[in-house]
Image: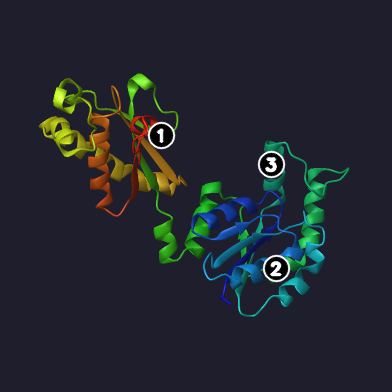
Amino acid sequence: MRRLRLIIVTGLSGAGKSTALRALEDIGYYCVDNLPSFLLGGLLTGLAARTDGPRQVAVGMDVRDTAFPASAAALFASLPDDHARELVFVEASDAALVRRFSELRRPHPLAGDGTVLDGIRRERAFLDPLRRDAGNLIDTSSLSTQALRNLIRQRYATDEDVAADRLRVALLSFGFKHGVPLEADLLFDVRFLPNPHYVPALRERTGREAEVAAYALDNDEARRFLDLLEAMLRFLMPLYRREGKASLTVGVGCTGGRHRSVAFVEALRQRLAKGGEAVYALHRQLAAEGGEGA
């Protein structure tokens, strides 16, 4: 049986439990939200018995499972001592919670026929024993969503987790005549480069081939643009990740999407990969033609 690291995330509705779970998922935790309390033991037993799979588990549990608050102490005591475990309790002030429920226009799960504030007060009373036992108490009253995600990463990410939490960068080549890709976060046009389409010996080949790439990129303008775009992306990537962006798609287009954009994307991928970035290339038009698109 493998030893697991278990984090149970609980707390007040609207305080940020789901955000905390997503942050843990980003750093490699296997996350389950709103798990019924009677399933927790079986989940841990099943995961511990596997020879592979996740060793870090985060579970969201709260008053949506009506049996949870009263049975929590007995439930935690029944868990095997083999597993490292921690209880994280997320809370916020009454004013902050009322404002959030008002903005979302959702009812509080314990409000019944009363107000949101009535529901908040009932929930505080139900969860107070858990709050007292929590190993990590997080007050999100003055925290933005991103600030809470950063706090979770700072407290729970290992060096391996940080490496796995890098921004994933997809470099996507395409042809403007086939339409701009909707998934692109950034778009660049390389139709100013020499076009292999007009060279009969290169026309039916692709930008993945050395001769085609050399024709399009072996010039001062291409080298300069590669330098500039690489520098800009290296500047932007940590800023996007700091704001919680997990992936970035950079579209690079030429006319048909087979020669210049493909060659440029491959050259840019090689440059960025040397810096240890999680970057990969996709070629929309090559994939559409039944060729190798990634």
Q: Earlier in the sequence, mark 1 or mark 3?
A: 3
Q: Residues within 10 Å of mark 2 (few under 14, many from 20)?
A: few
Q: Name the mark nearer the viewer: 3 or 2.
A: 2
Q: Quadrant of the N terminus?
A: bottom right
> x and y percent of residue 36 in the render?
75, 59
| Near-viewer residue (224 or 14) | 224
Q: Amino acid under label 3?
A: Arg
Left or right placement of residue 13 versus residue 279 in this view: right
Q: Quadrant of the C terminus?
A: top left
Q: Name the mark nearer the viewer: 1 or 2.
A: 2
| Residue 94 higher or lower than 184, as above or below | below
The label number, if any, that marks residue 42 in the structure image: 2
Asked if residue 141 can be seen in this view, the reply is no
Q: Residues within 10 Å of mark 3 (few under 14, many from 20)?
A: some
- Write down the residue under mark 3: 99
Which element is circle 1 on? loop
| Near-viewer residue (93 or 150) | 150
Task: Identify the residue shown where x is 28% and y is 29%.
Answer: 258
Q: Residues within 10 Å of mark 1 (few under 14, many from 20)?
A: few
Q: Earlier in the sequence, mark 1 or mark 2?
A: 2
| Residue 282 higher or lower than 125, as above or below | above
Task: Identify the residue shown where x is 60% and y is 75%.
Answer: 83
> x and y percent of residue 15 in the render?
66, 51
Left or right placement of residue 61 versus residue 245 in this view: right
Q: Amino acid under label 2?
A: Gly
Left or right placement of residue 22 versus residue 171 in this view: right
Task: Identify the residue shown where x is 41% and y is 34%.
Answer: 185
Q: Amino acid under label 1?
A: Asp
Cα–Cα gap, marks 1 and 2: 42 Å
Which element is circle 3 on? helix
**Badges 1 and 3: C-beta atoms under 8 Å apart?**
no
